[in-house]
Image (spheres, helix red, strand yellow):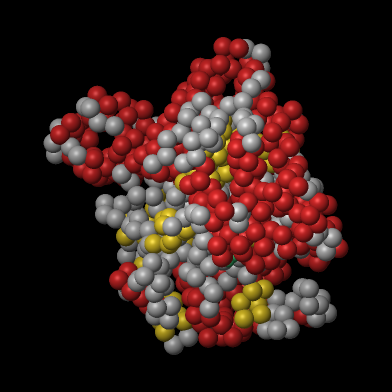
C-alpha cells in the first residue's frame, strides 16, 4: 500500500481536510505500525542502559528519518497543502532529561539500534519531567511541563513488578518507547511508573508533598533536594528505577532460558552516572533470592556492570547517608554493608576507598568502581583527570578498569533532521555514505579552495539564520538580523560553564558601543538554559542576562549593533533550530570542569567555529581541526588544578588590577541595570565575582575578550571564515555517537 493511501485511511478523511492534531495522530499511528513490522533486535548478549534521564527530543521526525520515509511524508503532506514541520511542532517534547547526560543517553539509544545491537534503555516515566522554565520580572520561574498526552509516543504495558520500600510495597507499571535505528534495528526504552501517582498534588509552581511517595514518586525529574524529604525522594526514585530494571533483566533472562550463574555471557549493564548505582546491590540481592551465594552473586554482577562517570564536580558524586537507606530501602543495607566490608578487608580500612565513610555516608560511585568491571570517562582529558586526580586511589588499585569513551552525537538528529539543507548539499558533494559512515565527511576537504562550495555552505548557514530569526521572533518576540554574527551559548546554567563570563563580555561590548566604538558587523548573542530551582547563583546569572537583554535591545544607540536574547525553556527542539544557525559556538567552561560537552560537537557538525577553553572534548575538537580553525583561550586544566590545590586564585586581585574588568563587574550594580533588575540578586552576583568566583571567571576574562575580538575580526575575512566552517564540518565525523557506541561495544559490552 502506498503512503498516501495508508495515511488517508488512518485519517478517515482527505489529507487536506485534516487539522494538525488529526494529522499528528494519524502519522504517529502510521509510524507505530511501520515500527511494529521491524522485529526486536536479538542477539546472544543484550545491553541494558540504565539512566535517570533520557532526553529523547521529539520522536516523529526522527522516526520518519530512521524508517527512511521522511522525505516521502514531507512531500505527500506538501502536496495536500499541509506541512510536516507544523505537524512535528505539535508533538510535545518528552521532558525526561536535564542536559548532556540525558541527551547522550538518547543519542546512544539511536546509535545502538542503528548498529543493530540488542540494547534497551531503562528509566522512569516522569509525569512532569524536568520543570518548564518561564521568565517573569527578568527571573526564572518553574512550572510543571505537561508533556504526557494522548495519543503519545509511550505504550502502556501490563508488565509490573513489586518494589519494596520498608513496610510499603508498591507495584510498578512499565511503559515502552520504541527505538528504531536508521535503516537498522528495533530496541526499546522501558520507563517505569506507578499508577497511583497523582498529578493534582502539585501546587504553587512545582511544589508538592514530598512525603507521599505513592502519589509523588515519578512526578518530577530531580525533585528539589534542599531538605531531607527531597533527598529521600531521590533515593526512592533511584531504587524504584533500579529495582524494576533488575527484576526486568532477571525475568527476561530467565524467560530466555539463560543460566543466571553465567549472566555475564548474556547481559551487559551500563550505569549512567551514579543515579542507577543501587542496581549493583539490588541485583546481588535478587540473585541471592535465586539461590546464588553472596560472593558468587557479587562476581556475576561485577562481570555485568560497567560505570560511566560524567562529572568531576563533587556535588554530583552522590553520597547517601546510611540512615536514609536504612529507612527507604532497609533490605539493601546488609548487601551494601557486605560490599563495604569486602573493601575494608581487601584494602585495610582505607577511608579513600571505603564505600561507607566514617560519617556513615554511602559513596555510590565507589560501589560502581569496586564492583563493576569498567570505569569510563567521557572525553580524553576528563578520563586523564579521573585517573590522575579525582579517582586516583581507584586508578592505583584498578588501572585495568579505566578507559575513555569520548562522547558523540547522533547525526540523524543533529544534521539530517535539524539541517536538511546542509545534509542534502553534502550528498551532492561526496555522496550519502557519510550518513552511516560519518568519517567520510572528511572527503569535504577536497573543496577547501572551491569558492562555489564554500559560498553555498555559507548561504545555507544564512538560510538557517533566517529560519532561527523567525523562530525567535515567534517564540521570544525579539527580532534578529540574519546578517549579524550569531554568537551562541546554550546549555544548562552553571557557574563552571561561565555564562557570567559571556555576560561580562556583553557589558564590555555595550560600553564600547556607548563609547562610539561600533563593531564592524552587528552581533547577536543568544543564551539558553535552565538553572536548577535551588541554585541561587545560576538564577542570578539568568537575571543578569535578562536585564541586559532588556537594556540593550531597547537602547537605540546600541541595539543596531548588539542584541541579546535569553531563550526560554531551552530544549532539544530549540537546539535543532538554533545550532544550525550559529556562527560562534561558546564552550567557555573553566578548564578541567566540563567532562566532555556534546553541544560543542553539534555546533561543529553544523559549521560553527568554537570559541573555547582547553576543556572536555574541546581539546579533541582542537586536535582534529587544528589551531587555525578553533579559537582557544584561558588557563589550562593543569594550571587551574594547580590554583585549586594551592588556593592560589584571588578574584579580587583581578578586579583591582584591571580597569576594564572593574568597569564590567561594577556595571552589574550600576544605575542602568539597577533600574531594571533586583538589587539583591545583582549585588550578590557582583559580590560573588569579586570575593569568591569559585570557577575563576575573572581569571580568564581578559583573554576571553581578546580572543573573541580576534574572532569577530576574522569573521570579516569571509573566505577564511568559510574555510573554517568547511573544516569544522569535515572533521566532525569522529563525534558520531556510532563511533562511541562501537568503542563501548568493543571494549566493554562485547555484544557481538
Ligand atoms: C548531578 C546532579 C546532582 C544533584 C542535582 C541533580 C543532578 C543532576 C545531574 C547530575 C549529573 C550531572 C552529570 C552530567 O550531566 N554531566 C554531563 O554529562 C555530559 C555527557 O557525558 C557531558 O558532556 C558534560 O560535560 C557533563 O557535564
Image quarter for ligand 1: bottom right
Residue under the point 73% across and 37% down: 706
Q: Is residue 455 above or below residue 622?
A: above
From where the camera sits, is residue 145 visible?
A: yes
Residue under the point 80% across and 60% down: 650
Of 343 and 322, the residue lying toward us: 322
List the single residue furthest toward the left.
13
User: As drawn, is 559 to the left or to the right of 343?
Assistant: left
Coordinates of residue 110 in the picture (x, y in percent): 49, 44
Of 116 and 544, the residue lying toward us: 544
Coordinates of residue 678 in the picture (x, y in percent): 52, 61
State which quarter of the image contains the N terminus: top left
Count of picture labels = 0
Q: Is residue 136 above or below residue 740?
A: below
Residue under the point 76% across and 62% down: 390
Coordinates of residue 589 in the picture (x, y in percent): 68, 49
User: As drawn, is 700 to the left or to the right of 148?
Assistant: right
Of 699 and 223, the residue lying toward us: 699
Amino acid at each position: 500500500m502506498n503512503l498516501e493511501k495508508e495515511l488517508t485511511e488512518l485519517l478517515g478523511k482527505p489529507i487536506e481536510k485534516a487539522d494538525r492534531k488529526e494529522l499528528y495522530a494519524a502519522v504517529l499511528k502510521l509510524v507505530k505500525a511501520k515500527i511494529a513490522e521491524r522485529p526486536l533486535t536479538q542477539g546472544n548478549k543484550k545491553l541494558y542502559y540504565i539512566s535517570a534521564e533520557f532526553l529523547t527530543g521529539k520522536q516523529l521526525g526522527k522516526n520518519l528519518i530512521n524508517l527512511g520515509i521522511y522525505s516521502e511524508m514531507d512531500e505527500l503532506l506538501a502536496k495536500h497543502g499541509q506541512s510536516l514541520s507544523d505537524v512535528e511542532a505539535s508533538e510535545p517534547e518528552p521532558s525526561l532529561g536535564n542536559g548532556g547526560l540525558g541527551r547522550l543517553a538518547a543519542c546512544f539509544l539511536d546509535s545502538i539500534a542503528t548498529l543493530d545491537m540488542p540494547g534497551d534503555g531503562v528509566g522512569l516515566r516522569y509525569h512532569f519531567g524536568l520543570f518548564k522554565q518561564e521568565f517573569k520580572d527578568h527571573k526564572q520561574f518553574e512550572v510543571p511541563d505537561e508533556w504526557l498526552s494522548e495519543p503519545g509516543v509511550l505504550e502502556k504495558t501490563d508488565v509490573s513488578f513489586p518494589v519494596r520500600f520498608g513496610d510499603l510495597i508498591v507495584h510498578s507499571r512499565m511503559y515502552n518507547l520504541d527505538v528504531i535505528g536508521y535503516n537498522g534495528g528495533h530496541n526499546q526504552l522501558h520507563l517505569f511508573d506507578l499508577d497511583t501517582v497523582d498529578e493534582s498534588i502539585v501546587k504553587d509552581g512545582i511544589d508538592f508533598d514530598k512525603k507521599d511517595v505513592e502519589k509523588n514518586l515519578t512526578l518530577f525529574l530531580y525533585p528539589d533536594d534542599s531538605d531531607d524529604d527531597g533527598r529521600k525522594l531521590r533515593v526512592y526514585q533511584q531504587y524504584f528505577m533500579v529495582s524494576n530494571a533488575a527484576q526486568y533483566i532477571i525475568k527476561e533472562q530467565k524467560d530466555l532460558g539463560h543460566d543466571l550463574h553465567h549472566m555475564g555471557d548474556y547481559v551487559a549493564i551500563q550505569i549512567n552516572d551514579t543515579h542507577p548505582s543501587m542496581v549493583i546491590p539490588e541485583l546481588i540481592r535478587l540473585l541471592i533470592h535465586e539461590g546464588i551465594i553472596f560472593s558468587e552473586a557479587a562476581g556475576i554482577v561485577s562481570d555485568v556492570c560497567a560505570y560511566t562517570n560524567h562529572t568531576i564536580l563533587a556535588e554530583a558524586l552522590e553520597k547517601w547517608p546510611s540512615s536514609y537507606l536504612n529507612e527507604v530501602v532497609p533490605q539493601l543495607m546488609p548487601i551494601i554493608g557486605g560490599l563495604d566490608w569486602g573493601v575494608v578487608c581487601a584494602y585495610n580500612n582505607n577511608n579513600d576507598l571505603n564505600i561507607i565513610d566514617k560519617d556513615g555516608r554511602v559513596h555510590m560511585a565507589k560501589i560502581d568502581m569496586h564492583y563493576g568491571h569498567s570505569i569510563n570517562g567521557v572525553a580524553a582529558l576528563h578520563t586523564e583527570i579521573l585517573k590522575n586526580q579525582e579517582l586516583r586511589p581507584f586508578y592505583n588499585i584498578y588501572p585495568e578498569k579505566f578507559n575513555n569513551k569520548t562522547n558523540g552525537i547522533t547525526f540523524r538528529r543533529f544534521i539530517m533532521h535539524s539541517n536538511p539543507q546542509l545534509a542534502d548539499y553534502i550528498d551532492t558533494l561526496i555522496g550519502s555514505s557519510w550518513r552511516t559512515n560519518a568519517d567520510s565527511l572528511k572527503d569535504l576537504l577536497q573543496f577547501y579552495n572551491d569558492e562555489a562550495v564554500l559560498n553555498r555552505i555559507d548561504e545555507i548557514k544564512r538560510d538557517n539564520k533566517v529560519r532561527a530569526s523567525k523562530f525567535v521572533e515567534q517564540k521570544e518576540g525579539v527580532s534578529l538580523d540574519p546578517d549579524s554574527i550569531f554568537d551562541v551559548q546554550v546549555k544548562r546554567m552553571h557557574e563552571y560553564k561561565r555564562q557570567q563570563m559571556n555576560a561580562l563580555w556583553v557589558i564590555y561590548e555595550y560600553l564600547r558601543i556607548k563609547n562610539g566604538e561600533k563593531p564592524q558587523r552587528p552581533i547577536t548573542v543568544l543564551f539558553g538554559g535552565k538553572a536548577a530551582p535551588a541554585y541561587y547563583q545560576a538564577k542570578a546569572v539568568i537575571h543578569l542576562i535578562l536585564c541586559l537583554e532588556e537594556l540593550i535591545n531597547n537602547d537605540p544607540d546600541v541595539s543596531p549593533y548588539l542584541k541579546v536574547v535569553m531563550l526560554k525553556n531551552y530544549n532539544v527542539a530549540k537546539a535543532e533550530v538554533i545550532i544550525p544557525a550559529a556562527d560562534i559556538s561558546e564552550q567557555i567552561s573553566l578548564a578541567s570542569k566540563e567532562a566532555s560537552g556534546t553541544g560543542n560537537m553539534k555546533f561543529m557538525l553544523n559549521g560553527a567555529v568554537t570559541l573555547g577553553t582547553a576543556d572536555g572534548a574541546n581539546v579533541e575538537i582542537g586536535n582534529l581541526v587544528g589551531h587555525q580553525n578553533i579559537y582557544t583561550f584561558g588557563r589550562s586544566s593543569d594550571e587551574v588544578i594547580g590554583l585549586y590545590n594551592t588556593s592560589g586564585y584571588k578574584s579580587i586581585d583581578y578586579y583591582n588590577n584591571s580597569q576594564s574588568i572593574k568597569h564590567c563587574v561594577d556595571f552589574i550594580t550600576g544605575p542602568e541595570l539597577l533600574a531594571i533588575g533586583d538589587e539583591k540578586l545583582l549585588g550578590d552576583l557582583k559580590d560573588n565575582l569579586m570575593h569568591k568566583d569559585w570557577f575563576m571567571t575573572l581569571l580568564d576574562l581578559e583573554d576571553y575578550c581578546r580572543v573573541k575580538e580576534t574572532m569577530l575580526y576574522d569573521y570579516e575575512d569571509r573566505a577564511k571564515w568559510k574555510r573554517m566552517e568547511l573544516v569544522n564540518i569535515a572533521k566532525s565525523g569522529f563525534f558520531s555517537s556510532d563511533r562511541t557506541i562501537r568503542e563501548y561495544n568493543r571494549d566493554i559490552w562485547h555484544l557481538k
